[in-house]
Amino acid sequence: MSMKTTIAPHWEDILVANGYPDFHSLWEAQAEWVEEPNDRRGGWSGVGTLTLQLDNGETKTLYIKRQQNHVFKSLCHPFKGQPTFRREIDNIKRFKAAALPTLTPVYYGERRVNGNQQAILITEALTEYTSLQDFIDNNSASDIDSSLRHSIIDNVALVVRQLHQQGLRHGCLYPKHIFIKITDKTNIDVRFIDLEKARQWPLRFQRSVRDLCNLHRYSQWWTSPDDRQRFLTKYLGTETLNAYGKKLSRQINKRTARKLAKKRQ
């Protein structure tokens, strides 16, 4: 059995005090599933929550993600592959280093047992946040004060801009992978999650089109021309939609139409 483990220093004693001193105890932990295990890539992967007791008597909720034989293959690892969680924890660290808002890592571990590749990724839960998808589903555009809607659009546009300025593409930028915390109408905190597919993407126009197509296609709020233009001008940092912005808008619309037509087939 081989093993690789990384633990955030201030969490190690807390995990031990709650009865989770090692990979095996976390693998066997009775977590409440948020996303039940799904079978893909020749293995399975699932997400649950784990509530730990802190020294001060309070509790802290964590996301615990576990997978087995759920791997991606690359030129460096063409046969056995690597756990997809390894790519995700590497991207979380990359985002943190670039000051891009994302999850806070607690624990990462992987092991190979009887030929099975197992991995665990634990992060702090975004307990005061809601996914943009849930917020959209639960609030129609007409029900939301326009200043709040504009603030959400502006803040999401700004963090996506920061992401792309780092030469990164999220790769799965759907509203369900953007979490927001609304303090008031002008104070919206935004976090990226699900970074498994994030990667460096040197072509500026392509990384914009691919990510923004996914985001706009599922953001029912932003179907109005005014809101789409507002998002793009904030994203581009311009007062009005310039020639580049218009070209970007046309390509997003064209790609979106192709995706929707393919889905209807």
Image (spheres, rainbow, N blue to C red):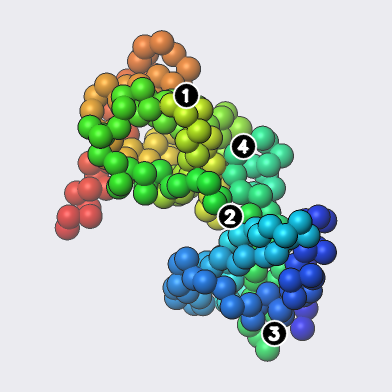
Q: Position of 146 compared to 50: left or right?
A: left
Q: Are marks 2 and 1 in contact (CB under 8 Å)?
A: no
> Compared with residue 182, is residue 118 higher up or lower down, i.e. above or below?
below
Can you identify the residue that label 2 sits on? Answer: 125
Q: Earlier in the sequence, mark 1 or mark 3?
A: 3
Could you tell me which secondary element the residue under label 4 belongs to? loop
Comparing labels 3 and 2, the label whose residue is closer to the camera: 2
Please state which of residues 83 and 102 is positioned toward the viewer in this rendering. Answer: 102
Q: Which mark is residue 113?
A: 3
Q: CA distance from mark 4 to mark 1?
A: 20 Å
How many residues crowd mark 1 within 10 Å: few (<14), some (14–19), many (20+)?
A: some
The kind of residue tagged 3 is Val
Q: Position of 160 compared to 89: left or right?
A: left
> Compared with residue 215, is residue 56 higher up or lower down, i.e. above or below?
below
Question: In the image, what residue occupies the spot 66% across and 49% down?
Answer: 104
Q: Are marks 4 and 3 in contact (CB under 8 Å)?
A: no
Q: Which mark is residue 186?
A: 1
Q: Which mark is residue 100?
A: 4
